[in-house]
Image: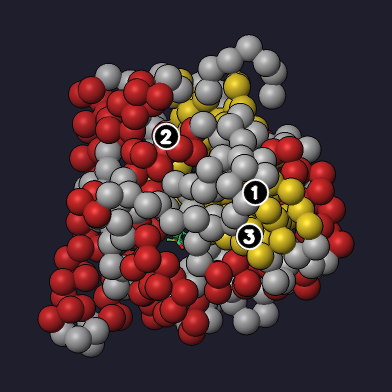
Amino acid sequence: MRENERGFLNSNIENLACPRCRGKLKLSRENLVCQSCHQDYHTPDNIIRLFWPNEWEASKGDVTEKIKAFYEETPFPDYDEYDNIGSLIEKSRRGIFAKLLDDQIPFGTRILECGCGTGQLTNFLSVANRTVIGTDICLNSLQMAQDFKECNELNNAFFIQMNLFRPCFQPNSFDLVISNGVLHHTSDPFLGFKTLSELVKPRGYILIGLYHKHGRIFTDIRRFLFKISRDKLKFMDRRTINKNISESKRNSWFNDQYKNPHESKHTIGEVLQWLKDIGFTFVKSIPKTVPFEGFRETEKLFKPDKPGNKLARSMVEFSKIFTGSGEGGFFIIIAKKPGSSPT
Ligand SMILES: C[S@@+](CC[C@H](N)C(=O)[O-])C[C@H]1O[C@@H](n2cnc3c(N)ncnc32)[C@H](O)[C@@H]1O
Ligand SMILES: [Zn+2]
């Protein structure tokens, strides 16, 4: 294990928890060992291994292994061949959302990303002196994330193999927990959301991105057409044929969008109910909950908006049919954990 990862584990050992029993962990050589159940987590390289399966009763159904196998085969979103830290910053900041996050999350913030895939956002956000921990179940994705980190000496980014339903952190550990495009690939998105919310510090934030119920209608139609044409109509997806993107990245997008073994779809209204259930307050949604109110480059991401009334939201949700499918038909919600201690 490199000095960087060893130093991280030593200085964060109090924040770590055994994903099996929630006990305290101790670092000895290449292993993290639980002080309570004695489970030994061997970390043979620089990706910290703290994965534990869900252990749900069989009747609940669990797609974790199927999803893991899928992303081990095609890690997402992958890197372009010549990506380096300069091009990552440039590409990330071209997207207004990543740029706003980078501009508005203070230096020194502790961030956890769950389902980080190949680690672009974790690596990008770590540049401005924030500690960012990227976690995923897929080792091949984490390896690409770690390779990029090492090549570019991003010593504030760390990668851990972790199942978001069995976190390896103590509750109230992070200023911000991000999970973008992940929960809809699990068997129980609300349980996942609730589990992640427990890791947020009082007055900290959670940010989730989910597939929208209406935003993926055209994607679903294309998926059907690709299936019956045995992918001969692939050109109908613009990104799949964009020659400015490397072949492996295009392939990764195509598989993620059209061959995924499991996805569910959600609405803003549904997530507002989740917030009520866990006692978080709504801060922001993209798209906005009020019709015709666009998302601007000057948007203050952490300044609370009103969740809007049901009619206004229905109009916004309906419009996702026409605006959604290009970028995957996502919506994003930011919410805040109540509490008295400042972030
Ligand atoms: C569509 S990719 C999103 C990657 C990245 N967040 C992004 O936006 O580009 C979904 C990721 O979620 C991960 N994932 C799925 N189920 C998970 C679980 N139970 N715990 C942690 N990660 C999970 C997958 O391995 C995959 O890398
Ligand atoms: Zn344990």
Q: Is 155 on the left-hand or right-hand side of 100? A: right
Q: Position of residue 233 (x, y in %)?
A: 23, 82
Q: Secondary structure at mark 2?
A: helix
Q: Nearer the viewer, residue 91 or 190?
A: 190
Crowd rating for badge 2 (residues with CA inside 10 Å; few <14, some 14–19, many 20+): some
Q: CA distance from mark 1 to mark 2?
A: 24 Å
Mark 2 within 8 Å of ligand 1, using the beta carbon: no
Residue 6 is at least partly visible in this image: yes
Amino acid type, residue under disc 2 in the picture: Lys
Which residue does the numbered mark 1 point to in the structure image? Answer: 34
Please name the residue shown 44% across and 56% down the image.
Answer: 53
Name the residue beneath numbered marker 3. Answer: 41
- Kind of element beneath mark 1: strand
Q: Does residue 239 appear to the left or right of 314 in the view shown?
A: right
Q: Is mark 1 within 8 Å of ligand 2?
A: yes
Of pointers 2 and 3, the one earlier in the residue sequence: 3
Q: Position of residue 197 (x, y in %)?
A: 49, 33
As drawn, the label of residue 194 is 2
Check contact, mark 3 vs mark 1: CB within 8 A: yes
Front residue of 68/103: it is 68
Q: Is residue 266 left or right of residue 10?
A: left
